[in-house]
Image (cartoon, rainbow, N blue to C red):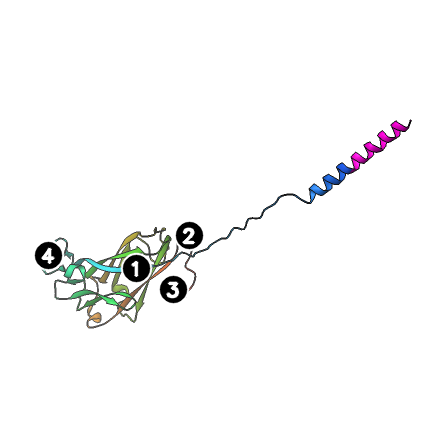
């Protein structure tokens, strides 16, 4: 009887010791912590635009077709002459390039290539708007574009990509004497936005 009682006590002690070891192991697990940093750099958005004269026309006579009629593109695309002595010239202005037409006659039209180059590191979209400043030419002003519609966002232009648009400006053949000696100007404004934008975000673009 005595031996049996000791055996039961021994068994009970073993169970208790095992429980203590298990509790101790719960609070002594190996562990580690990793900290990851996130670096954010915003991309840049920029573009350049320049004018190059590609053709001049006087009453259906084009420099591209008949240079001997006095209609010609000169100075590597920075100038043009018309049949009756009028001229067109591209100059560098403070905010971009300017096209000046002088002493033009009805039917004198100059065509320029507008080259837009994406100089940033993300895709862009661009939109061209035209405003007629203090002009009396009205309906007799010829102003046409190809490659993109005015006041319409273009398709995305990839970084380092170039898009070439065509703009024709001049006086209609129907212009009358009331326009002799008159002055006017046309401004093309080019807004650029990031390539996934769906609209121009307000008047303060680029401000």
Part of the protein shown in magenta: 1-16
Give the vertical position of 182 relative to 150 (above or below). below
Q: Which mark is residue 196?
A: 2
Where is residue 142? Give x, y as percent. Answer: 25, 61
Element class at badge 1:
strand
Where is residue 23? Give x, y as percent. Answer: 73, 42
Element class at badge 4:
helix
Q: Residues within 10 Å of mark 2 (few under 14, many from 20)?
A: few
Q: Which mark is residue 88?
A: none
User: CA separation, marks 1 and 4?
Assistant: 31 Å
Q: Residue furthest left?
A: 68
Element class at badge 3:
loop
Q: Which residue is at a point 16% across and 66% down the rendered structure image?
A: 87
Quadrant location of the C terminus?
A: bottom left
Instruction: Tell which of 20 and 160 is nearer to you.
Output: 20
Q: Which residue is mark 3?
A: 206
Q: Which residue is mark 1?
A: 48
Q: Earlier in the sequence, mark 3 or mark 4?
A: 4
User: CA separation, marks 3 and 2?
Assistant: 17 Å
- Which is closer to the viewer, label 3 or label 4? 3
Q: Which residue is mark 4?
A: 67
């Amino acid at each position: 009887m005595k031996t049996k009682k000791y055996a039961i006590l021994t068994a009970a002690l073993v169970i208790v010791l095992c429980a203590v070891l298990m509790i101790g192991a719960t609070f002594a697990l190996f562990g580690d912590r990793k900290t990851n940093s996130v670096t954010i750099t915003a991309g840049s958005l920029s573009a350049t635009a320049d004018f190059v004269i590609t053709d001049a026309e006087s009453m259906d006579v084009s420099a591209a077709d008949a240079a001997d009629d006095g209609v010609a593109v000169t100075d590597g695309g920075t100038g043009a002459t018309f049949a009756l002595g009028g001229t067109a010239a591209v100059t560098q202005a403070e905010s971009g390039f300017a096209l000046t037409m002088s002493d033009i006659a009805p039917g004198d039209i100059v065509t320029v290539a507008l080259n837009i180059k994406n100089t940033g590191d993300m895709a862009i979209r661009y939109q061209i708007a035209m405003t007629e400043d203090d002009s009396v030419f009205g309906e007799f002003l010829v102003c046409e574009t190809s490659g993109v519609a005015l006041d319409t966002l273009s398709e995305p232009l990839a970084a380092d990509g170039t898009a070439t648009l065509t703009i024709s400006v001049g006086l209609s053949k129907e212009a009358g004497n009331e326009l002799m000696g008159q002055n006017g100007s046309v401004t093309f404004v080019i807004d650029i936005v990031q390539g996934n934008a769906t609209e121009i975000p307000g008047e303060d673009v680029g401000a």
